[in-house]
Amino acid sequence: MAVASTPLITVIVPIYNVENYLKKCLNSIINQQYKKLEILLIDDGSTDLSGKIADEYAVKDNRIKVVHKENGGLSDARNYGLKIMTGEYVTFIDSDDYVTEDYISYMYGLLEKTNFKASLALCSLINVYSSTDRLQDNGNQTEVVLSGKKCIEMMCYHDLVDTCAYAKLGKRELYTNDFFPKGKLFEDIGSTYKLFLQCDKVACGFKGKYYYVIRPNSIVTSGFSSKKLELLAMTDQMAQAVVTTYPDLQKAVLRRQVYARFSTLNQTLHSENARQDQQMLINYIRKNKKAFLQDSKAPRRDKLAYRLLQLGLPFYRFAWLTYEKRKGE
């Protein structure tokens, strides 16, 4: 791929206290087959050696620019990168993850195959369970061009299309000012749908190119706190916006809303002080039981979760914790 004929692509890497993971991440970026890159390392107030490591890489590779800023959270770091980027396209990579050497060239190639009628491309994740180094490819090895609406529907059903900000390559214009909601957990569910709402065509390559590292102390896997309830607000915000544009996706967004309650309920199972939150979540799940179970597209695992919950919370807790343990092995 001739560098002169290709556009500048910006890679935004938000960094916060990941000294044990950062080098692997950065090595995977600087060794990309696609060479015409602007690599923005946004150090979000790290208190470990992450900032120093970023500076060392900037000395070695003139495509890298490091910004050291006060801690503002993941969304703030991503938004800062969007404000200063100069590339025509942008992709995000979290600093504790890493990518294949053709991560960018593969997605750019997907756009190229559509004669650039698609302004967004995506690939699949490969889950990396850090405690065991087990890998799980979430793709099915197919390539297809879908409408933004279809991507939203598939995202709501967890059908190949993910809510994550990373594993996507998009035109800069898709990312409006303060695209990511500042100060919120689960910000991706409150933002990625906005990309799909803007896209007539999305170039999808369901091949694993992004290694998503699942750590015991990550936001997703750490213990429950009331902050985790933000998933519900982010999901409901997405649901309202989608149904306003596509009323016929009501079933799909309801599935995602119910899933958000189940996911949060699962988080509470590790806590001894979440009974009130548990009851709120269970009430919502039960209220939407009939509509949910009548949805033929709802995954079997969701319907199984309903049946397990009918047997009582203690039984449901035992079943979930057993599954969770086996999944991490």
Image: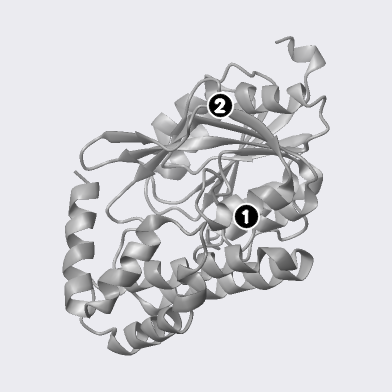
At which x and y percent is residue 176? 78, 56
Mark 1 packing: few (<14 Cα in 10 Å), some, or many (20+)? Answer: many
Any part of residue 69 in sight = no
The image quarter containing residue 168 is top right
Residue under pointer 1: 153
At which x and y percent is residue 154? 58, 50
Kindly report which numbered mark, 1 or 2, lies closer to the viewer in this rendering: 1
- Checking the image for residue 133, the label placed there is none
Q: Residue at 77% across / 58% down in the picture? A: 177
Residue under pointer 2: 103
What amino acid type should be assigned to the residue bearing mark 1? Glu
At which x and y percent is residue 15? 49, 47
Extreme top residue here?
A: 2
Extreme bottom residue here?
A: 276
What amino acid type should be assigned to the residue bearing mark 2? Tyr
Describe the element under mark 1 as helix, strand or loop.
helix
Viewer-proximal residue, 62 or 170?
170
Viewer-proximal residue, 161 or 127?
161
Viewer-proximal residue, 246 or 277?
246
Q: Residue at 60% across / 67% down in the picture? A: 251
Q: How is the image coloured?
A: one colour
The image quarter containing residue 114 is top right
Figure check: 172 above or below 315: above
**Quick one: quadrant of the N terminus?**
top right
Figure check: 80 above or below 245: above
Any part of residue 193 in sight = yes
Q: Residue at 51% across / 59% down in the picture? A: 296
At which x and y percent is residue 140? 48, 32
The image quarter containing residue 167 is top right
Figure check: 40 above or below 62: below
Q: Earlier in the sequence, mark 1 or mark 2?
A: 2
